[in-house]
Image (tube, helix red, strand yellow):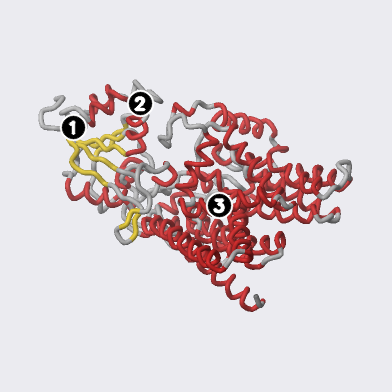
Amino acid sequence: MKRYSIFIILIFITFIGLTLRITGLTWGLSTSKYFHAASYYPDESEVLKAYQGINPRKLNFRLNTDTVQIKGTFQPYLMAVWIKLASIFNIVEIYSSFDYYKNNPNELVKLYVTGRSFSVFFGIATIILLFFIGKIFYGNNKIGLLAAFFLAITPLHIIYSHYIVTDILLTFLTTVVLILSYYIYKEASIKIYIITGLLMGLTGATKYSIFPLVIIPILAHILSKNKILDKRLLFYILFIPLGFFIGNPYSILEPQTFLASLKYSKKINITLNPSTNPLDCFGPQNNLIFYLITAPKYSFGIPLSLFFLCGIIFAFIKREKMDILILLWIIIYLLFIGIMSPWKVLRWQMPYIPLLCILSARFIMSVLKNAKKHIRFSMITAVFAVSITTLFYSLAYLKMMTEKDIRDESSEWIEQNIPEGKKIAVTDVYFWNPSIVMTLYWYTETEPFYTGIKKYKIYQTGWGDIEKLNKINSDYVILSDFEYYPILKLKDKYPHPELMPYLEKIMKSDEYKLIKKFEKKPELFGIVSAGGFLPHELRMLNPTILIYKKQTGAGR
């Protein structure tokens, strides 16, 4: 294939990836009349809050929230530079006081979009890197192009490129570490070992859970039949802490705070009993089984997952040095997230998605090169079919990101159908509620955006507090599937006896009547792409909201 053709195809793939990642980039922001400071993906606001109090002129770079500290700090620091550069070019306004953004909601939207564009950038950068990995690892431009295309249309990577999260940057950095590991395998100079150590430290400072992969460059060194007692390897190991310190300076400047954040991270990610909050309704399914069998269906779609599986099997059969390195990468990380933590989280698959794309592309190109004509035709047809179905899956979610959010739809219905001044009870005021609930509860009548909407009395009952619900004597109650579905579905496996009476009072007694249900499914052209009850990470786009009305005379 000529260089010109390769370049044009890569540009086209990049364009597809970019289009899919910027479509719906304002999802979940205050683009309606119902103001809410936090987006509907809750971790985003924590990153922006972390910048409050930072004062570079006084060399104060402390991040302000525990949510950021327990994951890693390099991504927030790097994104702060990104946002600052955007402000220099007058793309976004930076103010330390949140009052400015309350008075100028469009500027808050710009701030979020600027932060999200950071994820878009590194998502696209990873797509381009995959092309070079195909060329470098297997000497085949076509493998790189097909792998890049697969990543460009992979649903989970697209969805998370719309958020201010660590996972997209983390995936990019681990992909670079993999490339550097290749050069270590090829008997690289000491400079490559130093750069790899620095980058591995920065990657660990992006997200602490990636540190098991520190062994990958070491394995690359061993696969090249180098001596273990090699000064180059020593330099790699020595420069990891330096890279980590650059990405997380307060790990040394304030060690007690850093150790406390590690301890808290261990508590909530490793030792906490998941039955206290069964988010995903998968019951006591083994986590390793979840990541091997259940999660791919939601993250990649079944057709693309089958290609990924074929790529892994083919790599096991061939067992070339680069196959071994990639397989060890996947196995080590998969064992870590599948065994060490009790949680089932889709985005934790993100770092090995590029590797799955590479292996599947290599398998496909090998078939096309060596098989008979009718088999090659069948494979081309299969690639086309898988690409179309995967795109369909991704576009169904992007469609939801571009439509009016269900939280705004339910808010408009409330204003049209519930008389002003009525009492409305919710378990908690957070991103799963109708947006009008968040506006009325979080802010006061002095706020500029408070005018122009009907006023209701919003009350929090807490989960399972029947006494408080009775005391409020609310006219309406709002529930979301985040609150009721896990508890009802898993009541035998994860019993919550303290919550069941509360739910039964609202949902099954004659005291309240369901008057409206808001629900969306990811669909395109009327065809639902993913049915059933989705993991909570995907339900953020499409929560089910139920509105109950208290019956006349009931409980009074």
Extreme residue toward the left, this view: 553
Q: Mark 3 packing: few (<14 Cα in 10 Å), some, or many (20+)? A: many
Q: CA distance from mark 1 to mark 2?
A: 22 Å
Query: In the figure, residue 460 lies in which quadrant?
Result: top left
Which of the labelled discs sits on residue 491, or is there none? Answer: 2
Query: In the figure, residue 131 lies in which quadrant?
Result: bottom right
Amino acid type indicated by mark 3: Phe
From this view, report whether residue 10 is shown above or below residue 285.
below
Amino acid type indicated by mark 1: Tyr
Mark 1 lies on a secondary structure that is: strand
Amino acid type indicated by mark 2: Lys
The residue wearing badge 1 is 512
Which x, y percent locates residue 284? 46, 29
Q: Mark 1 packing: few (<14 Cα in 10 Å), some, or many (20+)? A: many
Which x, y percent locates residue 160? 50, 52
Q: Earlier in the sequence, mark 1 or mark 2?
A: 2
Mark 2 lies on a secondary structure that is: loop
Q: Residue at x 85, y 43 (%)?
A: 234
Look at the image and tell me whether residue 236 can be seen.
yes
Q: CA distance from mark 2 to mark 3?
A: 35 Å
User: Between residues 450 and 417, which one lies in front from this camera angle?
Assistant: 417
Q: Residue at x 10, y 32 (%)?
A: 552
User: Between residues 185 and 232, which one lies in front from this camera angle?
Assistant: 185
The nearer-to-camera label among 3 and 1 is: 3
Which x, y percent locates residue 226? 86, 47
Mark 3 lies on a secondary structure that is: helix
The residue wearing badge 3 is 308
Q: Residue at x 37, y 29 (%)?
A: 490
Which x, y percent locates residue 48? 52, 48
